[in-house]
Image: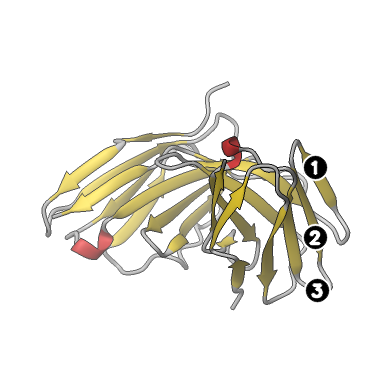
Amino acid sequence: GAGVSQSPSNKVTEKGKDVELRCDPISGHTALYWYRQSLGQGLEFLIYFQGNSAPDKSGLPSDRFSAERTGGSVSTLTIQRTQQEDSAVYLCASSSRTGARDTQYFGPGTRLTVL
Amino acid sequence: ELKVEQNPLFLSMQEGKNYTIYCNYSTTSDRLYWYRQDPGKSLESLFVLLSNGAVKQEGRLMASLDTKARLSTLHITAAVHDLSATYFCAVEGNTPLVFGKGTRLSVIA
């Protein structure tokens, strides 16, 4: 079946511009996560959506970052006034969150380059 | 704050040899994951370990979990070139997952 998809796969932008990154989770998955992978920094949790509950935004690095999830499915991560340090691969994951075996399945990522 | 440490961070091993990657974490958790990432690709789930003493095996890889020691190991048996990748462990804490920095494995002939 279809996995997690993300778009665009690559995004190059100028410092100060806003960008939107999209994630389509696996159909039926109620939980959706955003992570950031920077060179040499490993993976960093950003935000987590679970069903209709309020999202866990504890990982967002600044108020320039926001995310929404419409209709419990597609999610958009928005970065306002991008900075060079925002350059990274942004990964989305989803899980079914049923029982204890809620492995997260990752999308291919969006590589963001801020010039 | 949950911290996850992997070692080694870089590993070059010969084909046919055995080796172990270690994953230590700082606070109690009973859910640990191992992922594989090939260059330029996303993360592929390998194992989920849910209880103390859990052991799972897939091909040449075997993962185990000791929740009392807060330690997981990923053992590689008779390495082959196809296993070259970066391996991450991840532990579920207050935020969904905290990842180690990854172990970049290179298997050479």
Whole-angstrom CA distance, mark 3 to mark 1, is: 21 Å
The type of residue carrying mark 3 is Ala
Q: Nearer the viewer, residue A2 or A68?
A: A2
The chain under label 2 reads B
Q: Residue at x 32, y 54 (%)?
A: A88
Q: Name the residue furthest right.
A: B53
From the image, tell me which residue sits under label 2: B65
Q: Which mark is first along the chain, 1 or 3? A: 1
Q: Which residue is mark 3?
A: B69
Label 3 marks a residue whose chain is: B
SS assignment at label 1:
strand
Residue B57 got which mark? 1
Which of these two is toward me, B86 or B106?
B106
Image check: A99 left or right of B103? right
Q: Give how far apart the Cα atoms at labels 1 and 2 are.
A: 12 Å
Gap in angstroms between the C-alphas marked 3 and 2 = 9 Å
Percent x, y for residue B34? 65, 51
Q: Residue at x 62, y 42 (%)?
A: B45
- Horizontal and vertical percent position of residue A94: 55, 42
